[in-house]
Amino acid sequence: MAAGSRLGERNTRQRDTIAEVIRDAAGPLTVPEIFERSQQSIPGLGIATVYRTVKLLSEAGQLQAVILPSGETRYESAQLGHHHHFHCRVCQTVYDMQTCLVRVPESRSVDRGFVIESHELTCYGVCPACA
């Protein structure tokens, strides 16, 4: 049975809460961040449940992994469309940026024959709350 079918068969309060935490975030979250925020609504929630749910939602195409240049993996809704991220060096929060700062000729051959299919960008600096 496909992951999407399993996902549709059984909705749990935990799954709904985890999906809502990710959907309401200002940027992609790590599993520990998802766990911490979800525990505010479900105090007895276990970290293993969060890992399983993130895996299930990813397999169902509802989440996508954001892998920062540091190698850290975070998760966000797959429905956000093309966007970039801003990583605050002070508070370590990663925010979604609504504008694309790079205009790249996608699907065209550039510099020595490289064909660009997509791009990702993470900016680093200080967020307004930490400035």
Image (cartoon, rainbow, N blue to C red):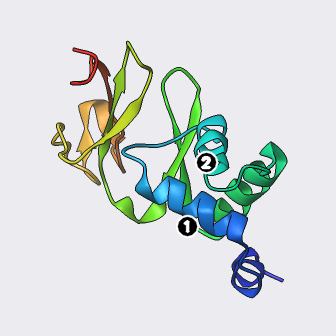
Residue 75, image x and y in percent? 55, 47
Q: Is residue 57 left or right of residue 76?
A: right
Residue 113, image x and y in percent? 32, 38
User: Which residue does the image show at 27% across and 17% down from the upper left?
Assistant: 126
Q: Is residue 20 above or below residue 128?
A: below
The local secondary structure at tag 2 comes to loop
Q: Which residue is mark 1?
A: 62
Q: Is residue 99 above or below residue 30?
A: below
Residue 66, image x and y in percent? 51, 42
Q: Which residue is mark 2?
A: 40
Q: Is residue 84 above or below residue 12?
A: above
Q: Within the image, what quadrant is residue 58 found in?
A: bottom right
Looking at the rendered structure, the kind of residue marked 2 is: Gln
Looking at the rendered structure, the kind of residue marked 1 is: Gln
User: Which residue does the image show at 73% across and 49% down from the upper left?
Assistant: 43
Residue 37, image x and y in percent? 58, 44
Q: CA distance from mark 1 to mark 2?
A: 22 Å
Look at the image and tell me in which quarter the N terminus lies: bottom right
Look at the image and tell me in which quarter the C terminus lies: top left
- Report the front residue among 50 and 62: 50
Total marks in image: 2
- Report the front residue among 116 and 69: 69
First of labels 1, 2 by sequence position: 2
User: Which residue does the image show at 27% across and 45% down from the upper left?
Assistant: 109
Q: Is residue 108 left or right of residue 54?
A: left
